[in-house]
Image (cartoon, rainbow, N blue to C red):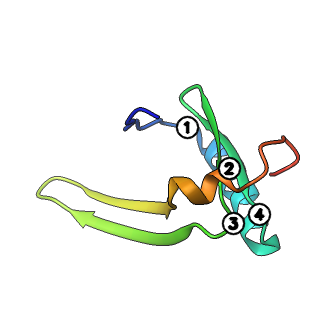
Amino acid sequence: MSERDVEKDYTVADFAAKLRRLADALESGKPFRIQIAGERFTVPKNARISVEHERGEDEEEVEFQLKWALADAAQEPEDDTAV
C-alpha cells in the first residue's frame, strides 16, 4: 500500500453527517467505513482516538485523529454493512 497524505474540505452539513456516523459507530463498537478523496477504507473499531490542537502565528487548528495499525484494519470485515 502506498503512502498517502490528503486533506479534504467538506461542507458543514457533510462534515456533521460524517461525525454523526462516526459517533454512532464508536458508541456501538463497530468499524467505520468512510471515503475520502476517492478512496474508501475501514477504520477499525479499536482505532486510537485523539484530539490535537496547534497554534501558529496566524492561525489555529484542531484535528480529530483516529490511528490504527494496518494489520488491525485487515481484520475488519470489508463489506458495506459497517457504518
Q: Earlier in the sequence, mark 1 or mark 2?
A: 1
Find disc 2 in the rendering and name its residue. 18
Q: Nearer the viewer, mark 4 or mark 2?
A: 4
Q: What's the mark number on residue 25?
A: 4
As helix, strand or loop, the secondary structure at mark 4 comes to: helix
Amino acid type at circle 1 is Tyr
Q: Disc 4 to disc 1, how far (Cα)?
A: 20 Å
Q: Nearer the viewer, mark 1 or mark 2?
A: 2
Q: What's the mark number on residue 10?
A: 1
Amino acid type at circle 3 is Lys
Q: Position of residue 39 (x, y in %)?
A: 59, 30
The answer to whether the residue labelled 3 contacts the one labelled 4, judged by CB atoms less than 8 Å apart, is: yes
Q: Disc 1 to disc 2, how far (Cα)?
A: 10 Å
Q: Is residue 23 above or below residue 21?
A: below
The answer to whether the residue labelled 1 contacts the one labelled 3, judged by CB atoms less than 8 Å apart, is: no
Q: Earlier in the sequence, mark 1 or mark 3?
A: 1
**Dot 2 crowding, Cα within 10 Å, few <14, some 14–19, many 20+:** some
Q: Is residue 35 above or below residue 55?
A: above
* Residue at 37 percent of width and 36 percent of height: 3
